[in-house]
Image (tube, coloured by chain):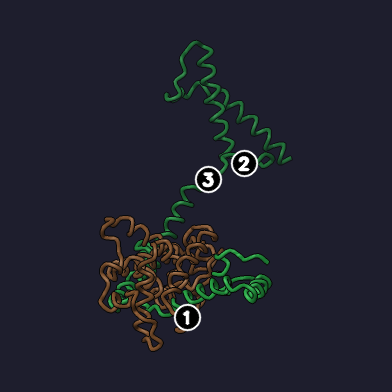
Chain colours: A green, B brown
Amino acid sequence: MSCPRNEEWVLYAAEELPARRRRALASHLAGCPACRREAAAVSRGLAALAAIEAPGLGAEAEASLRRRLAAAHRPPAVIRFLWRHRWSAAAAALVLLAVGAWMLAPPTSPTPAHPAPGTWLTDVQVQAELAEIAAGVEILEAGADGQVADATMPAPETNGDWLLDEIDRFLEQLRAEIEA
Amino acid sequence: MTQGPSDPRRPEALLTVFAPRVYGLLYRLVGRPDVAEDLTQETMLRAYRGLRSYRPEGKFRAWLFRIAVNLARDWIRRQPRQASVSLEEGADPPVAAALGASAPPDSGVTRRERAARVEAGLARLSEADREVILLRYYGELAFKDIARATGEPIGTVLARAHRALRKLGDLIPEDEI
């Protein structure tokens, strides 16, 4: 085996070589005085590091660091405020949710003015229906006569009397048929 | 991220386990205790704030010491060249004495004397070489992790380590080991 690169003696001395490579280098050392000197010098260098006296971090500096780390550990001010007032915040959130839900809800459908098909009308309902029809017919007739119909003006009472009489007669017949 | 009681990423662990080591590294790199303290605090705060983005791909220590090394490099870069830190120029008398080439290898050398000799030797190294050695000593990092911490190829790191260790090894006579 030829002499390994000098850098490899660093890994050898630091015991960071794979076992197989380490065995190979140990075997080489046995027969190579130059590499033995090289490896010994590197090992002395590593051993010399043990002599270094580690300077200590001052008590004041450590206390200051402790305070700064504690401050960094604290959650942001907004989170701390919300946590302190969490119950008020929860109540406010509920109110907001309720208001939002009310505003976003679709409008409730109005009660139908007319009964479902297939059910009998009461007399009052029939009268109301007929009044509406009469008003409509009145407007149509007025239009046919070349007059401008004004929806805001009350219709003259006499114009619809004949129709109401006709309908009254029809209803009388209908009741008679039902009773029969 | 889970943080058990012994998790090295807890703030207490950052303080008790790593702060002295980081301070030691920074003190040796910048040479001024006040600056080293400031940079230690900055390193710890950055590490703590950066824990969310930390991915445990390598050693946590390599990640932490990389922050410290980068801060030290930035600080050194900002200094005027003549103010570059070197114990060679302003060494204490005991250190200067220990540096003397004529100092005979004394088998009865005290631990303090040897420490002074090694520290003087460290001060003589180039910044880049010293960085590698200090990461090995204070960070207890494997060389592949030192490569990660310094952002340099492993070959470059090993070349720096070899050069530095040879110089330091020459300061220690064979019979002292």
- Name the secondary structure under disc 3: loop
Q: Nearer the viewer, mark 1 or mark 2?
A: 1
- Please tell me which residue is depicted at 54% across the width and 74% down the height of the picture: A37
Disc 3 chain ID: A
- The residue pinned by badge 2 equals A115
Q: Amino acid at mark 1?
A: Glu
Q: Indicate the secondary structure of the residue bearing disc 2.
A: loop
Q: CA distance from mark 3 to mark 1?
A: 93 Å
Numbered label attached to residue A106: 3
Query: Disc 1 designates what residue?
Result: B174
The amino acid on which the numbered mark 3 sits, given as a three-letter code, is Pro
Coordinates of residue A124 in the picture (x, y in percent)? 56, 39
Chain of the residue that carries numbered disc 2 in the rendered image: A
In the visual, does B132 lie left or right of A60? right
Mark 3 neighbour class, 10 Å CA radius: few under 14, some 14 to 19, many 20 or more: few
Which amino acid type corresponds to the residue marked 2 in the rendered image? Pro
Q: State the separation of the CA atoms marked 1 and 2.
A: 115 Å
Report the front residue among B46 and A146.
B46
Task: Name the subunit of mark 1.
Answer: B
A123 shown above or below B165: above
Q: In the displayed orientation, state which residue is furthest to the right.
A: A180
Report the residue at 47% width, 65% height from top.
B163
